[in-house]
Amino acid sequence: IAFGGIITAAAVWSIWGQGEIFPKEQDPTGEPEMWTREEMRRWLAARNLHPNSKDSREQLLERVKANMRVPRA
């Protein structure tokens, strides 16, 4: 019985324990001016920049632009 429990636990861990069940959504692509308000909120949240639910679209856009990395050549 103990051996069967170990096998079952290993199988459950290999299926459920190695990653997230629902993968994170991809970052939005393109120019931030074209992103939706929700895409900007998600982008900021993914970087632990804590978007406020009351922020306007313009405020979110300003924060996204201020925190975007400059591409290296």
Image: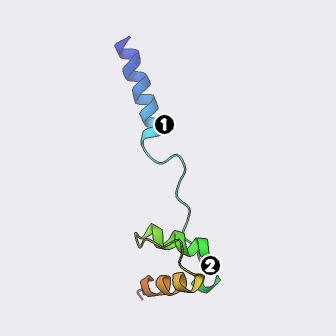
**In which quadrant is the N terminus drawn?**
top left
Label 1 vs label 2: CA separation? Answer: 35 Å
Q: Nearer the viewer, residue 21 or 38?
A: 38
Q: Is residue 21 left or right of residue 67?
A: right
Residue 69 image offset from top left, x and y in percent: 42, 83
- Whether residue 14 is visible here, answered yes or no, is yes
User: Which residue is rendered at x = 57% and y = 81% of the image?
Assistant: 56
Q: Give SS at disc 1.
A: helix
Q: Is residue 4 left or right of residue 21?
A: left
Q: Nearer the viewer, residue 4 or 43?
A: 43
Q: Nearer the viewer, residue 61 or 25?
A: 61
- Tell me the amino acid under the disc marked 1: Ile
User: Which residue is rendered at x = 60% and y = 81% of the image?
Assistant: 30
Going from N to C along the chain, the mark reached first, 1 or 2, is: 1
Q: Report the residue marked by disc 2.
A: 35
Q: Report the residue marked by disc 1.
A: 15
